[in-house]
Image: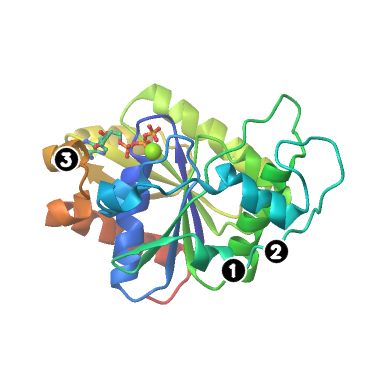
């Protein structure tokens, strides 16, 4: 199963992606968590201590590896290089494993305007494609707001895109535009999770405005989640109430996708 977590800045994408990854690993799935945010912090949401991440370089920044695999010279542009670099060994070689979750920090490629085809982007795309199409693992991707950089072929392999929203109209508008984009990219299913809920009324109000987007559940506004983030620890280890909310979201997701739990 391949899940992409998206949404506006600061809504709780990393909190949800980390929580889901930890839960599914605990349930015995082989989980690969992909940090595809340039400002990578999925590690701390998974509970990986900062010391352990010291020296971890995002794959997009591994110049020598990219040069070797794509047969290019570092920093070159527009010259010949391989479009199908070998990547199948990389998830094992370059990941950190914590509590059963294999974390890959992808980084991002700053594209110069209209979709650059450079060795870095070819590498990342090949690796994502490998993870999404060739592997049986559960893959959970913590994305930036968009899915554009996945490309059409790859986005179609995502079983579920979860849009995280906060109570508020702006967040709902974002969810709608992400849904349209996902439709264009042929993502199969798009779901909503409501985060930072402060009261049942609030949840009801947002649900009534979802305009047909399937709803997986909510995560309460929770000081322990904030505190965990401040301390660089995982909310999953900090509060059983959060774990229970994640479990309900996961169960609803599996039901919707017709996966036997
Ligand atoms: N349910 C919650 N209750 C309280 N605080 C929360 C909750 N969910 C997330 N937060 C806090 O909100 C902030 C943003 O959360 P998070 O990093 O998960 O969002 P994000 O969408 O990944 O952000 P970014 O767009 O920067 O990647 C963090 O400080 C986090 O601890
Ligand atoms: Mg994030």
Q: Quadrant of residue 194?
A: top left
x, y percent for residue 231: 16, 40
x, y percent for residue 27: 31, 73
Q: Secondary structure at mark 3?
A: helix
Say which residue appears at 75% left-offset and 34% top-offset.
Answer: 116
x, y percent for residue 217: 31, 50
Say which residue appears at 24% left-offset and 32% top-offset.
Answer: 202
Q: Secondary structure at mark 1?
A: loop
Quadrant containing ligand 1: top left
Q: Nearer the viewer, residue 36 or 61?
A: 61
Q: Which image quadrant: the C terminus?
A: bottom left
Residue under pointer 1 = 89
Q: Is residue 113 visible?
A: yes
Q: Is residue 135 above or below residue 208?
A: below
**Distance Cα–Cα, label 1 vs label 2:** 8 Å
Q: Are marks 1 and 2 in contact (CB under 8 Å)?
A: yes
């Amino acid at each position: 199963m391949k899940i992409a977590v998206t949404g506006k800045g600061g809504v709780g994408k990393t909190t949800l992606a980390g929580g889901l990854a930890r839960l599914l690993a605990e349930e015995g799935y082989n989980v690969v968590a992909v940090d595809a945010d340039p400002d990578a912090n999925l590690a701390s949401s998974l509970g990986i201590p900062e010391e352990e991440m010291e020296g971890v370089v995002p794959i997009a920044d591994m110049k020598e590896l990219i040069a070797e695999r794509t047969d290019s010279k570092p920093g070159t542009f527009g010259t010949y290089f391989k479009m199908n670099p070998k990547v199948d060994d990389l998830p094992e070689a370059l990941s950190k494993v914590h509590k059963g979750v294999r974390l890959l920090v992808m980084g991002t490629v700053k594209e110069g305007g209209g979709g650059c085809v450079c060795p870095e982007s070819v590498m990342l795309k090949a690796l994502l494609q490998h993870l999404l199409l060739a592997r049986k693992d559960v893959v959970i991707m913590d994305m930036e707001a968009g899915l554009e950089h996945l490309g059409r072929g790859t986005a179609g392999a995502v079983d579920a895109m979860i849009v995280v929203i906060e109570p508020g109209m702006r967040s709902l508008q974002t969810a709608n535009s992400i849904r349209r984009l996902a439709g264009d990219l042929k993502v199969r299913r798009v779901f909503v999770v409501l985060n930072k809920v402060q009261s049942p009324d609030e949840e009801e109000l947002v649900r009534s405005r979802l305009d047909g987007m399937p709803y997986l559940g909510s995560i309460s506004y929770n000081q322990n989640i904030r505190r965990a983030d401040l301390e660089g620890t995982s909310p999953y280890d900090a509060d059983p109430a959060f774990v229970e909310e994640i479990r309900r979201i996961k169960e609803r997701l599996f039901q919707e996708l017709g996966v036997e739990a």
